[in-house]
Amino acid sequence: MKRYYFPILFLLLFAGTLSYAVDGDKQSEKYKVEKIEKAGLIKLIGERGGKPLLLNLWATWCVPCREEFPSINKLAGEFKGADFAGISIDFPEEIETKIVPFLKSQKAKFISYVSGFEKDEELINILDENWNGALPATFIFDKNGKKIAFLEGKRTYQELKSELKKALN
């Protein structure tokens, strides 16, 4: 009978490893960050599916962005009637070394992209021609893709919540 223990033990260990690998894949998929360019951004803003969008631009090197992120993350967990997205202004080459580790540390509840725009001015002009590019920057769009709020600089949870509630009404 003892000779059956080894194959059973092996199968149990293999099944546990397989389960961990599958869960690990789910985690990696959750924090997958892709480049977003003009067409993708226009689609993200315009194709709302009946939901408003809170779009936050941030960077891992931006201290106010890092301080504001938990508030946006909390809102993303609370407001199921809205979509949330972030665009990191870090370099695309820093996805695995900086962006994804930050998102994991924050347990980000919303999708994040990295800017794939060659020129910052192009990104700025799509979102708001009067924006000087300062971070963090939050844009709120209604369910039809019309910009209804632009919040420049770090905002509190209550400020963000108040603006988001306006979009939901």
Image (cartoon, rainbow, N blue to C red):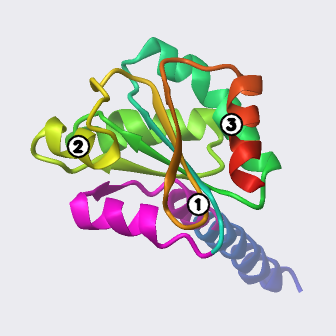
**Which mark is drawn over residue 98?**
none
**Label 1: which secondary element:** helix
Res. 130 image quadrant: top left
Q: Residues within 10 Å of mark 3 (few under 14, many from 20)?
A: some
Q: Position of residue 126 (x, y in %)?
A: 27, 49
Kind of residue sitting beneath label 2: Asn
Residue plotted at (54% across, 67% down): 144
Q: Which residue is mark 3?
A: 163
Do the residues bearing badges 3 and 2 touch, measured as CB atoms within 8 Å?
Answer: no
Q: Which residue is mark 2?
A: 125
Kind of residue sitting beneath label 3: Glu
- As measured in the structure, the alpha-carbon distance from the residue carrying label 1 to the one carrying label 3 is 36 Å
Furthest toward the left, the residue is 118
Look at discs 1 and 3 and give the one toward the viewer.
3
Q: Which residue is mark 1?
A: 24
Q: Position of residue 55 (x, y in %)?
A: 50, 46
Q: Is residue 45 left or right of residue 66?
A: left
Q: Tell me which numbered mark, 1 or 3, is placed earlier along the sequence.
A: 1
Q: Tell me which numbered mark, 2 or 1, is placed earlier along the sequence.
A: 1
- As measured in the structure, the alpha-carbon distance from the residue carrying label 2 to the one carrying label 1 is 38 Å
Span shown in magenta? 23-49
Kind of residue sitting beneath label 1: Gly
Res. 164 image quadrant: top right
- As measured in the structure, the alpha-carbon distance from the residue carrying label 3 to the one carrying label 2 is 22 Å
Q: Residues within 10 Å of mark 1 (few under 14, many from 20)?
A: few
